[in-house]
Image (cartoon, rainbow, N blue to C red):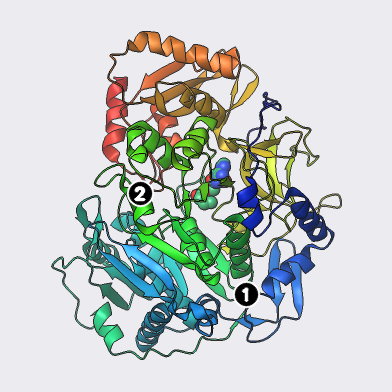
């Protein structure tokens, strides 16, 4: 693993964005001093802090012990029993929320369907009973391969209700990728839909699933949701229509009482090798921290309409669509379609129509909207919004400011939330009523967490010094293992800073970061994206941020190419913003290099700038730098490409090179 980069300048004098008085007044945590108090009490007794959050849940049996930590095995709320679905649904049925909208779903073609908490509860119970009818028992794995429809959430909740472990596979994955994930998890039931409507097209999910399960010996039954009416064949004895199975099922299904550490779900994520990792999350700790963070980071209120654009196939869709908001009794807007469909104004239209108050999306989406032009958001009022969030990658200040002014109309705080599939919930983030934010930093760790930026030897970094981001104390929603491969879990996350007589043994995030003098953490990016050029260590994310700060640039990805003299040189792939002016690309290449030189330093300027029409991305929108690295080094592309958004983009890049 490469050593982290040397210090790069952070503009310490930049004026931050303070929460407005109006926002602070109504917020759950409404001042910096209040947050300091919460933080210091939590730091004094981390376990007590999390126990207080766990005590907001309904327990079927109280826990005896808050944390049992035998490095690197964590058990939270030992001896307790609860049910996650009960804590998301049943808890609201005794209150006025019974008839509150839990899910407002809008299809891509504009149909709206609303499910109240009572209705959602009935559907979940029916689905849970249907699963039981198919022989599903606690600890059985149920694969879910669906689009953004309410049934996806109903299916997840139904699994949680009966103690089955769900394995949601993003609907954009190929049959190969689905098969690998089903086989690794040994799922016995698959829930899918005939087709999913996405970008004006019907994705034939059942057909793709059929292809996958030809070689999935563990699958016994397939439940098929009818969404599009796409002609679909059902295998006799194996496949059942969802609506038929549910029609025959009772609307009552008592939540199964499950131990705190009962597995809740497996979610596959890409590692540094080709084989995806099945991240395993468990029940009580997960729902405790997901509920707490939904409350304080999104300042969730009963009057809110919350819109998270993440697909349920990713961790954000698990924690901040399917679980956290429901545990808080919130109203979720669930949108089926793509962000640009039929126009780049679709999200803004949805926000105005449903009076959305909280909007949570990814920097990559924000940059795509920037590229599409200001006129799209300017056509809409967006006056219901009160809070914005981002997640998934560092947000470049340029995009942050655009989001703040064009979407938030300079009125809404922005929470830049850092976390990972493995952390289960948000770890570093502003508290919107209390934290002064700075474009480009997720600011500080949330209460009850011990996070630091350290050197390879474990000592804490100085202000401005690049280092490794570590978590020094277990947290409730941490991944417990990689499904079926505990030793890979230990090797990947707990071996960089192992337990010794001087070190308690820390979790290594894989991210590089630095702290500023206010204690804000600036994520540089994955350490495998850190590059050494002529002895200078550079975060590619930082150079990309500089490039994107140039008025002509929409997106940029910087990768390294080996160089005999400098060790590495940088190659930047750049897409340009829409403009009517004809650009002199040769001149622009020089201008962009100079621009990076000005923003960071001459040494950071890419050796080469290549223009592309689009960048190759994973389905979740992350730029596939590994592939770009292979392109610049002239190798053919190998490894796992099952997460590619658009192979044609790749072909194009290779073509450009010739
Ligand atoms: C990696 C985790 C967490 C849900 C979506 C991604 C990067 C995530 C931020 C942020 C800078 C971020 C990190 C992290 N990342 N959020 N706010 N600022 N970087 O989940 O696919 O597990 O990826 O995404 O590099 O390690 P994931």
Location of mark 2 (residue): 347
Looking at the figure, which quarter contains the N terminus? top right
Residue 642 visible: no
539 relative to 642 in the view: left or right: right
| Residue at 73 percent of width and 30 percent of height | 465
Residue closest to the far left: 231
Splitting the image into 4 quarters, where does residue 467 fall? top right
Instruction: Indicate which label's residue lies in the foreground, 1 or 2.
Output: 2
Quarter of the image where one finds residue 198: bottom left
Which is nearer the eye, 569 or 17? 17
User: Which residue in the structure is indicated by mark 1?
Assistant: 261
Q: Which one is nearer the viewer's eye here, 6 or 242?
A: 242
User: Where is 651 relative to 596, above or below?
Assistant: below
Position of 103 with respect to 265 (left or right) is left
Q: Residue at x 64, y 45 (%)?
A: 19
Taking the spot 58% from the left edge, 35% from the top edge, the residue there is 439
**Residue at 52% from the left image edge and 62% from the top image edge:** 319
Q: CA distance from mark 1 to mark 2?
A: 38 Å
Kindly identify which numbered label has been placed on residue 652. none
x, y percent for residue 323: 51, 67
Q: Is the CB atom of the residue marked by disc 1 within 8 angstroms of ligand 1's nearest atom?
A: no
Q: In the image, 70: left or right of 256?
A: right
């Amino acid at each position: 693993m490469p050593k982290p980069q040397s210090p790069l300048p952070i503009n310490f004098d930049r004026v931050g964005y303070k929460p407005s008085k109006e926002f602070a007044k109504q917020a759950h945590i409404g001042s910096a001093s209040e947050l300091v108090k919460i933080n210091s009490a939590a730091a004094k007794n981390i376990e007590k802090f999390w126990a207080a959050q766990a005590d907001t849940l309904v327990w079927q049996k109280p826990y005896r012990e808050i944390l049992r930590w035998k490095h690197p095995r964590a058990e939270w709320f030992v001896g307790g029993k609860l049910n996650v679905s009960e804590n998301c649904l049943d808890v609201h049925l005794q209150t006025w929320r019974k008839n509150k909208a839990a899910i407002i779903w809008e299809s891509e073609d504009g149909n709206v369907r609303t499910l109240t908490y009572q209705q959602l509860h009935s559907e979940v119970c029916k689905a849970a009973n249907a699963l039981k009818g198919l022989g599903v028992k606690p600890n059985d794995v149920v694969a879910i391969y669906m689009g953004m429809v309410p049934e996806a959430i109903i299916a997840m909740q139904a699994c949680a209700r009966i103690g089955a472990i769900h394995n949601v596979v993003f609907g954009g994955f190929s049959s190969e990728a689905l098969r690998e994930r089903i086989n690794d998890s040994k799922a016995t039931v698959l829930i899918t839909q005939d087709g999913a409507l996405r970008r004006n097209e019907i994705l034939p999910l059942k057909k793709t699933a059929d292809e996958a399960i030809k070689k999935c010996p563990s699958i016994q039954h397939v439940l098929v949701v009818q969404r599009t009416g796409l002609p679909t064949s059902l295998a006799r004895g194996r496949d059942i229509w969802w609506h038929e199975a549910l029609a025959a099922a009772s609307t009552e299904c008592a939540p199964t009482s499950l131990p705190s550490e009962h597995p809740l779900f497996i979610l596959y994520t890409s590692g540094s090798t080709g084989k995806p990792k099945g991240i395993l999350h468990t029940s009580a700790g997960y729902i405790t921290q997901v509920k707490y963070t939904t409350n304080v980071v999104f300042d969730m209120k009963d009057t809110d309409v919350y819109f998270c654009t993440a697909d349920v196939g990713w961790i954000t869709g698990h924690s901040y669509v399917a679980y956290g908001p429901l545990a808080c009794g919130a109203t979720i807007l669930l949108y089926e379609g793509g962000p640009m469909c039929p126009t780049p104004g679709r999200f803004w239209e949805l926000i105005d129509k449903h009076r959305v108050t909280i909007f949570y999306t990814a920097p990559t989406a924000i940059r795509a909207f920037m590229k599409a032009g200001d006129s799209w958001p300017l056509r809409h009022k967006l006056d219901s919004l009160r809070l914005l969030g981002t997640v998934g990658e560092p947000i470049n200040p340029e995009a942050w400011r655009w989001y703040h002014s064009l979407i938030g109309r300079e009125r809404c705080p922005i929470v830049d939330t850092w976390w990972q599939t493995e952390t289960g919930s948000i770890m570093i983030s502003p508290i919107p009523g209390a934290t002064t934010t700075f474009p480009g930093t997720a600011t500080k760790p949330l209460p009850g967490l011990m996070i630091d930026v350290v050197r390879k030897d474990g000592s804490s970094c100085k202000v401005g010094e690049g280092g490794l981001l570590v978590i020094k104390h277990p947290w409730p929603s941490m991944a417990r293992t990689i499904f079926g491969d505990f030793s890979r879990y230990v090797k990947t996350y707990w071996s960089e800073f192992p337990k010794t007589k001087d070190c308690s043994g820390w979790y290594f995030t894989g991210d590089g970061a630095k702290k500023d003098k206010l204690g804000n953490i600036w994520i540089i990016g994955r350490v495998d994206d850190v590059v050494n050029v002529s002895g200078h260590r550079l975060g590619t994310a930082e150079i990309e941020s500089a490039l994107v700060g140039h008025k002509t640039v929409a997106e940029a990805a910087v990768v390294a190419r080996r160089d005999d003299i400098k060790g590495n040189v940088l190659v930047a792939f750049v897409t340009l913003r829409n403009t009517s002016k004809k650009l002199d690309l040769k001149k622009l290449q020089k201008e962009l290099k100079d621009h990076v030189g000005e923003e960071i330093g001459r040494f950071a300027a890419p050796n080469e700038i290549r223009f592309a029409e689009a960048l190759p991305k994973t389905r979740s929108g992350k730029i596939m730098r590994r592939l770009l690295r292979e392109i610049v080094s002239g190798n053919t592309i190998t490894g796992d490409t099952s997460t590619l958004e658009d192979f044609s983009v790749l072909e194009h890049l290779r073509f450009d090179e010739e």
